[in-house]
Image (cartoon, rainbow, N blue to C red):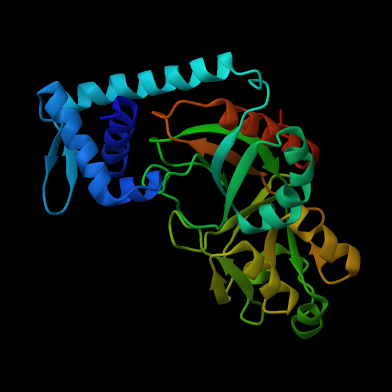
Amino acid sequence: MDRFDAMQAFVRVVETGSFTRAAQTLDLSKTSVTQLVQQLEARLRVKLLNRTTRKVNATADGVAYYERAIRLLADLEDAESSLSKASALPRGRLRVDVPSPLARMILVPALPAFHARYPDLRLDLGVSDRMVDIIGENVDCVVRGGELTSLSLKARHIGDLPLGVYAAPSYLERAGEPSHPRELEDTHHRVVGYLWSRSGKALPYVMRKGGEAVRVQGRCVLSVDDGNAYLEAGLVGLGVLWLPRYMAKESVARGDLVPLFGAWHMDPMPLYLAFAPNRHVSAKLRVFIDWMVELMAQHAPVAR
């Protein structure tokens, strides 16, 4: 039995709650993972896991061993990095999930510079606006906009996205240009709703001008859960959009979107990079976090 492989297999089973999912994240067969854990239990002479047909849970001894195992695995990775001549250039596979517009407009165009700096890092980029199970899907980190509600994750505040309100010329020709945000509640106006993954709902926006604050929901003819689809719906004239300005910049420059309510403002949308609190922040994850902070400082720095 390879003790390192067995320890790693046990840790992944605990984190995913499943031999099948652990095997998938380790690129091993379920049989191999099961045998490694059984061999580890035989060597330690304790039962580490309670197995049922629906779920796998760590025993009291398993919880204690898990806490030590993740520290040992982290120490081993650090030791290997410190002895490597290429310790300044992290290597390996990094799994990241980011919102689709951020990937298309900001992150992917900047990746040539990232890979020139870290040529031995392989980036597996998930592009979505959905909720991601960081542990279960073996994702190293996610980048998400809006306030984080999960207390089970560690997060780094990496940017603040200024927001604006926009509509396509075709929409304004049909419905008229509103002069006050409250007019968006009128029957002849429509908005495109964005379905937030945390709630599954299109939430109202608070707009301010001087001492006046207006909470606007609007009337939806369409709600979507993807940023690129949301933008496209506005471009074809389906309704008014609330957008981070970086998403609207090119469309405004081409005349495909028109900014509305220039005298009104909204609080910026915070952007977070989140990762599992019980995961060791490896060198490869650390450099990616630092690079994302550097990248967002160019596009939407954290408001001070």
Look at the image and tell me in which quarter the C terminus lies.
top right
Q: Dividing the image into 4 quarters, which one contains the N terminus?
A: top left
Q: Nearer the viewer, residue 26 or 178?
A: 26
Q: Is residue 283 above or below residue 174?
A: above
Residue 245 appears in view: no
Q: Residue at x 26, y 37 (%)?
A: 14
Q: Give residue 190's position: percent from left, percent from top.
A: 64, 76
Q: Nearer the viewer, residue 4 or 274?
A: 4
Q: Answer left or right for 139 relative to 247.
A: left
Along the line of sight, the residue nearer the viewer: 43 or 48: 43
Specify whether 61 is left or right of 134.
Answer: left
Query: Is residue 78 in view from this perspective?
Result: yes
Q: Nearer the viewer, residue 293 or 50?
A: 50
Give residue 300's position: percent from left, percent from top: 75, 41
- Residue 280 spot, x, y in % from top left: 45, 26
Which of the 4 image quarters holds residue 47?
top left
* Image quarter of residue 58: top left
